[in-house]
């Protein structure tokens, strides 16, 4: 799986057979402004094949793969399971997948991801098990995502979705004989921004994970929307902590400190009155 392409994967027990007309009707039923995809699908989508979908702004390659994800690709979508454990069973059940990839990567990557996510959700209505992002290290139960969107316009819901959900995944790394955890994003290079990481003590995991997700999302959204970069030395504040941005050097022998777009380490300083374990 190339790491230089914006892509999503929909996992199935068996590849579904669907037509261009079915996808167009499904899309119109779930959004009042569904992208006007122009499809080129194979006659039989239930076997290994390739097709495509295009809008005025994006060209999407659709790969129908009658086999399981294996090796590094499988490991990367499973890395998210500690945070989203209900995906594990569905991943185990899959025996095929459909990959959507944008070619070439666009100037506005978030827009492309949103169009890709909409198409992935439409295709996932055909008994999809998981919607995943190999490059973002994410995986979600497809039925739960579709249920989450049930009362909304799907495109509206996807455009309001934080980047640190499907497009960039938070992963927690645990080190042997160490009470500290390393929580980081993956896939931000495809969004044109640095990845983010922070150290969390196991003692305060439940308190720090939600706060970190919110901080990461805010920083990522700011960089994507403004085009400005958050850099080492910058500080921000929340109600409870001062947020300090540091440089995180890459270490050749430790992949969890590596990112094609560089990495920033986020450190928290509790404000007076808030007592947290020291680490």
Image (cartoon, rainbow, N blue to C red):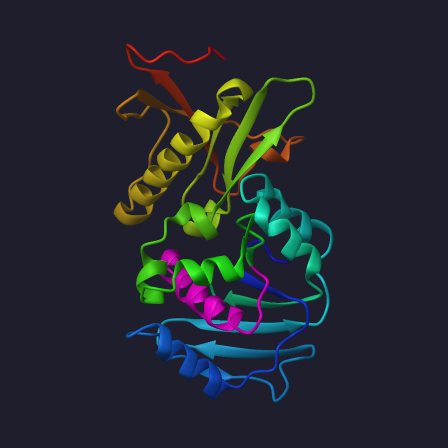
Decide: is 238 above or below 161: above
Q: Is residue 116 one of those drawn in magenta?
A: yes
Determine the residue positioned at 46% across, 12% down. Answer: 277
Q: Position of residue 129 (x, y in %)?
A: 59, 62
| Image quarter (top left, top right, bottom left or bottom right) of the N terminus | bottom right
Residue 23 percent coordinates (x, y): 46, 80
Q: In the depicted view, which residue is nearer to us: 258 or 173?
A: 173
Rendered view: 100 above or below 179: below
Task: Using the rendered image of the protein, determine whether residue 6 is visible from the camera's viewpoint.
Answer: no
Q: Residue at x 42, y 82 (%)?
A: 24
Is 129 contained in the magenta span? Answer: yes
So how many labels did they put on this image?
A: 0
Please indicate, yes or no, whether residue 149 appears anywhere in the rendered image. Answer: yes
- In the rendered structure, the answer to whether residue 277 lies left or right of residue 2 reads left
Left or right relative to 88: residue 135: left
> Magenta part of the protein: which range?
107-130
Q: How far across and how far down the image is residue 42, in percent? A: 60, 85
Residue 116 image point, x, y percent: 45, 65
- Which residue does the image show at 32% across and 44% down from the upper left? 221
Snapshot quadrant of residue 147: bottom left
Snapshot quadrant of residue 90:
bottom right
Residue 276 or 262: which is nearer the viewer?
A: 276
Q: Nearer the viewer, residue 265 or 126?
A: 126
What secondary structure characterizes most of the magenta part?
A: helix
Q: Residue at x 31, y 55 (%)?
A: 160
Q: Is residue 174 above or below residue 14?
A: above
């Amino acid at each position: 799986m190339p790491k230089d392409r914006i892509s999503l994967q929909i996992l199935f027990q068996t590849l579904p057979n669907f037509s261009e007309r079915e996808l167009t009707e499904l899309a119109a039923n779930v959004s009042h402004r569904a992208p006007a995809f122009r499809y080129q699908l194979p006659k039989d989508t239930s076997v290994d094949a390739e097709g495509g979908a295009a809008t005025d702004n994006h060209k999407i390659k659709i790969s129908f793969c009658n086999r399981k994800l294996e090796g590094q690709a499988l490991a990367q979508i499973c890395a998210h399971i500690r945070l989203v454990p209900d995906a594990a069973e569905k991943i185990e059940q899959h025996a095929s997948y459909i990959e959507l990839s944008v070619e070439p990567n666009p100037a506005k990557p978030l827009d492309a991801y949103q169009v890709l996510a909409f198409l992935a959700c439409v295709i996932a209505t055909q008994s999809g098990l998981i919607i995943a992002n190999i490059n973002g290290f994410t995986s979600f139960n497809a039925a739960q995502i579709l249920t989450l969107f049930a009362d909304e316009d799907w495109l509206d819901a996807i455009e309001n979705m934080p980047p640190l959900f499907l497009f960039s995944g938070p992963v927690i790394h645990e080190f042997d004989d160490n009470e500290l955890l390393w929580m980081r994003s993956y896939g931000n290079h495809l969004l044109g921004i640095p990845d983010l990481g922070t150290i969390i003590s196991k003692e305060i995991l439940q308190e720090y994970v939600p706060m970190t997700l919110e901080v990461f999302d805010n920083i990522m959204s700011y960089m994507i929307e403004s085009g400005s970069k958050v850099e080492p030395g910058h500080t921000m504040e929340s109600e409870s902590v001062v947020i300090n941005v540091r440089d995180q050097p890459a270490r050749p022998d430790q992949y969890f400190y590596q990112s094609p777009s560089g990495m920033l380490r986020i450190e928290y300083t509790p404000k007076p009155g808030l007592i947290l374990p020291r680490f």
